[in-house]
Amino acid sequence: MARYGPQFGPDITYLGVDRCDHTDPATMAVADVVILGAPFDGGTSHRPGTRFGPQAIRMTDYLPHDGSRPSLALRTDGLRDLRVLDAGDVEMYSGDIEVALPALRSAVADVVRAGAIPVVLGGDHSIAFADAGGVADVLGQGRVSMIHFDAHADTGDIEFGSLWGHGQPMRRLIESGALRGDRFLQIGLRGYWPPPETLDWMAAQRMRSYEMTEIGHRGLQTCLTEAFSIATDDCDGVFLSVDIDVCDPGHAPGTGTPEPGGLTARELLDSVRRICLELPVVGIDVVEVSPPYDHADITAALANRVVLEALSAIARRRSALPPFDPSLPLLADRNLP
Ligand SMILES: [Mn+2]
C-alpha cells in the first residue's frame, strides 16, 4: 500500500517535516525517527474522540510548520539535528480492533527494521499493545523495557467481554512475552482503578508502579532515577508510553478518562526530557488526546510538546555537546560584558 496520509486529512505532517512511506524502506533509509499516526478510538471505555488525536498533535503549534524547532533549554533542533519523517496515519478503522491493531504493529515493525525510532501519535491506549509489540517483534521479545506514564495501570484482563481495549494493553504485552513484567515501570497511577485482583496480578509479574502518593512523598526525580536503573538492567532499549491523562485534568482536559491529582505539564515534559537524555529509547507513543473534549487546545499543545521534548532530548543525547546541565542560566554560553 502506498502512503496513506492522515486518515482524516488534509495531508499535513508533524510540524512540517518531510513525508515517507513505511511500506517503502528506501524512503526511510536515512531516518532517525519516523512519526506514525494511529487514529483509533475503538478501544475506548468512556469518552471517545482520540481518533482525532494524531492530526491535532501534528498541527497544534503557534510557530511556522517549517520542520525546525531549536530548543531553548537543550540547544538542539530536534527536527533538524535528527532526520525526522512522517509516514502519515496507519489505516485503523475504529470499528474493528482485531484488524486495526495488527496493521499498526506491522507498520511499527517496518519503521524499526529501517533503523528508525517510531513515534506513534494515538489514538487510545489499546494501540500500545501493537506499537510496543511491533518494536519487540524486531528488537526481541523481552529485550525492551517499558516506562509508562498514566493515571491508570491498563492491566485489566477482560473488559466489556473483550481481551482488547484501552484498559488492557499492558497486561497483553506482558502475557504475550513481548515485554517483561519485571522491567515494566509505571509512573503517575492514582484514583480508583484497577481493583485488588488486578493489583495481585501486577505484583505477581513484579511490575513496579509509582502511585502519585509515593511520587509526592519521595519526589518525582528520585522515583525516576530508581525506575531508570530497573529499565536498563539486562534490556537493550526502552519504550516510552505517555498517556496524556497522567497529567492533571487541569493540564490535560482533552482526554477520555480524566483523573484528578496528576502531574503538571512541566513535570511530564521534564520527565520525558530526562528519559530521552539518559536512556536508549527505541520507541515512543503519546496517546489518549481527545480533541472533542479539549479546551483551547491545552491537551493537544501539550502532546505536541511532549513529542518535541523527546526529539530535542534524543538529539542532545546523540550530539557532541557536553552532558546537559539543568542549572545553567539561559544565556550562560553567550559572551556577556
Ligand atoms: Mn492508558
Image (cartoon, rainbow, N blue to C red):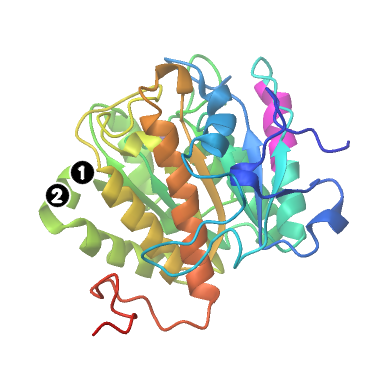
Residue type at mark 1?
Answer: Met
The residue tagged with tag 2: helix, strand or loop?
helix
Secondary structure predominantly adopted by residues drawn in magenta: helix
Circles 1 and 2, Cβ within 8 Å, touching? The answer is: yes
In the rendered image, the quadrant that contains the C terminus is bottom left
Quick check: 145 above or below 17? below
**Which residue is pictured at 38% across the width and 40% down the height?**
201
Residue 167 bears which disc, if any? none
In this picture, which residue range is highlighted in magenta?
97-105
The answer to which of 241 and 233 lies nearer the viewer is 241
- Horizontal and vertical percent for residue 312? 48, 62
Binning the other alpha carbons within 10 Å of mark 2 as few (below 14), some (14 to 19) or many (20 upward) gives: few
- Tag 2 residue: 216
Residue type at mark 2?
Answer: Gly
- Horizontal and vertical percent for residue 171? 48, 39
In the image, 172: left or right of 259?
A: right
- Tag 1 residue: 212
**Which residue is pictured at 49% across the width and 14% down the height?**
160
